[in-house]
Amino acid sequence: MHSHTQPHATATGIPSPAPETAHTAHGHRSVAEHRQAVRDLLKPLLSAGRTERLPLGDALGRGLAEDITAPLSLPPFANSQMDGFAIRTEDVPDGGGELRVVAPVPAGASPAPLQPGTAAPIMTGAMLPQGADAVVPVERAVPASFPVPGEEAAVRVPPAAAGTYVRAAGSDIEAGDRALSAGTFLGPGQLGLIAALGMPDVLVHRALTVLLVTTGDEVVEPGGQLEAGKIYDSNGTLLQSSLRQAGLSVIRAGISTDEPVALRRLLSRHLTEVDLIVTTGGVSKGAYEVVRQAMDGQDVAFQHVAMQPGGPQGIGRFDGVPLLAFPGNPVSCLVSFEMFLRPVLSELFGSPAARTLVRARLGQPLTSPAGKHQVRRGTLLPDGTVRLEGGESSHLVRALAHSNALVHVPEGTSALAEGAEVEVWML
C-alpha cells in the first residue's frame, strides 16, 4: 500500500541504449532521460517498511532486500568428488603401491583419522578422513571394486597428487564472504545457494501493487458487442500480463470513458490500495486526450520522448501516488513498459530479472527516423540473425505476438543494411 509520502550476450545489468544527450536535437526528451525520470519517481518506494521475510519456497522471483554474508563455508568440510579410495599420497610411491583397506566412509559419516599405509573406501560427498589428502577413483584401483565390509583386504592404487578428486572446504565460498548482494533477482540458483548456507528464509522487497487503467470511449472489453467504430481492448491484457510477469500485483480498473471527471473519480477510489498507477491512452496532443485533461492541476508532466513507437509519455503523481501514462497503441504501450518501467523495477527492486541482451545481425535492411530511438519487433533465429516482424507501425499486434525480441536502432541512425549488427533484447 502506498503511504502517500513524498556488447555481447549477457543477462546481467540493466539494458540501456547507446549513450544519449539529455535532450535530442528536436527538443524531445531522450530515452535515457525519461528512464532516469521513472527511476527518480519510483526510488522513494525503496523504504525499509516495504520489505518482508519469506520462506525460501515463497521467494522465487523476488528481489533480495539485503546483502547475504555466508555464515559457513561451502563445502563446510573437505569431501570426496568420486566414489573411490581415500589415501595419504605420501604412502604411494611413483609406481603405485598396495594399501590395507579399512572401514568405508559413507556420506554423512564422521570418519576416524586415516592411518599410514591404509586406504578407506569413500562415497561421493563423504567427509575426507583426517590425514587423507587425495581420492583414487574405484575404477583405477586393483581390484576395481570395493571389498566386502568387515573382511580383510588390500588394494593397489596408482600415485596421485594431493588434492586429486577432493572438494576442499570453502572451495565454493568461505565463511564471511558475501554470498549475494542486495538487489539480486532470486531465481532457483540463488535460492539454492541460500538453502545451502542453512538459511530457511530471506528478506525481499514487497511486490508493488499497480492500478492499471485503459482509457477510451472507442474501447470495448473482449467478449462485448463490437459496434461500428469500436475496437477490443488489447492493452489491458497486454500490460496486465507484462506487469504480473514482472512480479507486480495488478488491480485492473477496467476501461475508463473519455470523461476526465470520471477518470479522476476512478483513480481516487483506489489510491489507498496501490503504489503506482499505470494508464494507457489519452496522452497525445489531440482534443480528446482524457488522461491529459484529468491530470489538470496534478503534479504530472506530459512530453514527447524521442522514441518510435511510444513517443507520448506522461509521468508524475496523482494525489501523491506515482503515475505513468503510456500511449494507447498496443505496441507503443508494451515498448513503453519494456523501455522504462521494467528495467527500473529490475534495477531498484531486483525483480524482474533484467532482459538478456545479445548482439545479432539484421536479416534485412531497415530505415529509422534519425532523431529517434527506434524499437522494432523481431525473431532471433538459431543462426544469430534477427528477422524483423511487421513494420514500424505501433498497431501491429500480430507482429508482436510472433516476436521473441526487441530490436534497437539508436537515435542518429537513419538506415541499417542487411547484416548490420544490432542490439537485441530477448522477450
Image (tube, grey):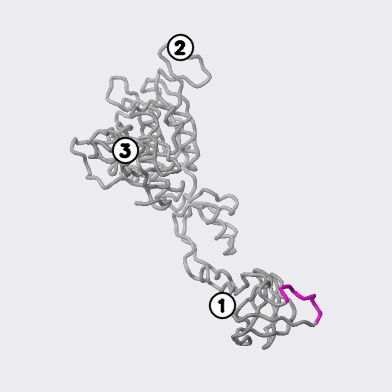
Marks 1 and 3, Cα distance to the nearest angstrom?
53 Å
Marks 2 and 3, Cα distance to the nearest angstrom?
43 Å
Left or right of 418 in this view: 187: right
Q: Is residue 222 above or below residue 411?
A: above
Q: Residue furthest top?
A: 228
- The numbered disc on residue 163 is 1
Q: How far across and how far down the image is residue 12, in percent? A: 41, 53
Sequence order check: which comes first, mark 1 or mark 3? Answer: 1
Give the amino acid type for the residue marked by disc 3 in the picture. Answer: Glu
Number of residue marks: 3
Q: Which residue is mark 2?
A: 227
Marks 1 and 2, Cα distance to the nearest angstrom?
77 Å
Give the amino acid type for the residue marked by disc 1 in the picture. Answer: Gly
User: Residue at position x 59%, y 64% from top?
Assistant: 198
Q: Is residue 327 above or below residue 150?
A: above
* Tags 1 and 3 touching, CB below 8 Å: no
Q: Is residue 273 above or below residue 132?
A: above
User: Residue at position x 38%, y 34% from top?
Assistant: 388
What residue span does the magenta drawing correspond to?
A: 143-151
Q: Which residue is mark 3?
A: 418
Q: How far across and how far down the image is residue 209, in percent? A: 47, 40
Q: Quadrant of the C terminus?
A: top left
Q: Secondary structure at mark 3?
A: loop
The answer to whether residue 285 is magenta is: no
Q: How far across and how far down the image is residue 368, in percent? A: 27, 34
